Image (tube, helix red, strand yellow):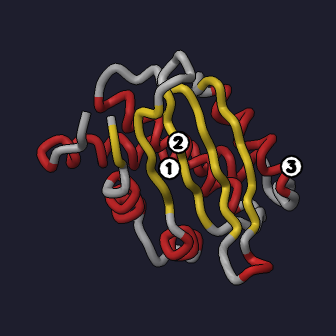
Amino acid sequence: MRFKASKLIGLTMLAIFIISNTFIAVASDYSNVAKSDDNAKFIIYNTLSEYGIKDVFLNVADGRPKGGYKVLVLSYSSEAFDTKKTATEITEILASFLGTVKSGWDCDELWVVVGDTTGKVTLATWHCSREWTEAYIREDMTSEQMISNVFGTVSGF
């Protein structure tokens, strides 16, 4: 599957709805709780479990001491069978990350590896950059822009 321009408009509208609802729920439910990496990973893991996203593994890589970024590397098994389900998975993961950052967790980027249900094949990768995360949290970037940027990074499927 690839995100074609004709499908992107409809998927963007669906994604905006999902990201808005998930972002609000995560940010309000966990306000001032997600200060540590362990708490943030717990929040994201539980949020994704509630949405039925399976086999989630989370790792925080802090490259700041060497001049890099602090990155959440997330992998999961996708059960998506079409672009709508794929877009929903991407959006739920993105919203849980952004909601946790908004609630106080200090993390720069999200990098995602999508595997098949057997755990043997990588289906895709995608990411949310530091610049986008900061702009979205400052409210200098709309949900539409964020979704468009992230969908543009999807490689695979």
Residue at mark 2: 113
> In x, y percent, where is residue 62?
76, 66
Question: Does residue 128 lie above or below 66 as drawn?
Answer: above
30 vs 106, nearest the viewer: 106
Q: Position of residue 71 (x, y in %)?
A: 66, 62
Q: Amino acid at mark 1?
A: Ser
Q: Which x, y percent locates residue 82?
A: 30, 24
Outermost residue, left side: 6
Tell me what residue is drawn at x 56 percent, y 72 percent. Answer: 130
- The residue pinned by badge 3 equals 38
Q: Are marks 3 and 1 in contact (CB under 8 Å)?
A: no
Q: Is residue 103 above or below residue 67?
A: above
Q: Element type at marker 3?
A: helix
The kind of residue tagged 3 is: Asp
Where does the N terminus fall, quadrant-wise?
top left
Separation of disc 3 and disc 1 at Cα?
24 Å
Name which of mark 2 and mark 3 comes first in the sequence. Answer: 3
Query: Which disc, if any, is residue 20?
Result: 1
Give how far apart the Cα atoms at labels 2 and 3 are. 20 Å
Residue 128 placement, left or right of 104: left
Look at 49% across and 47% down and name the residue there: 19
Q: Residue at x 57, y 43 (%)?
A: 22
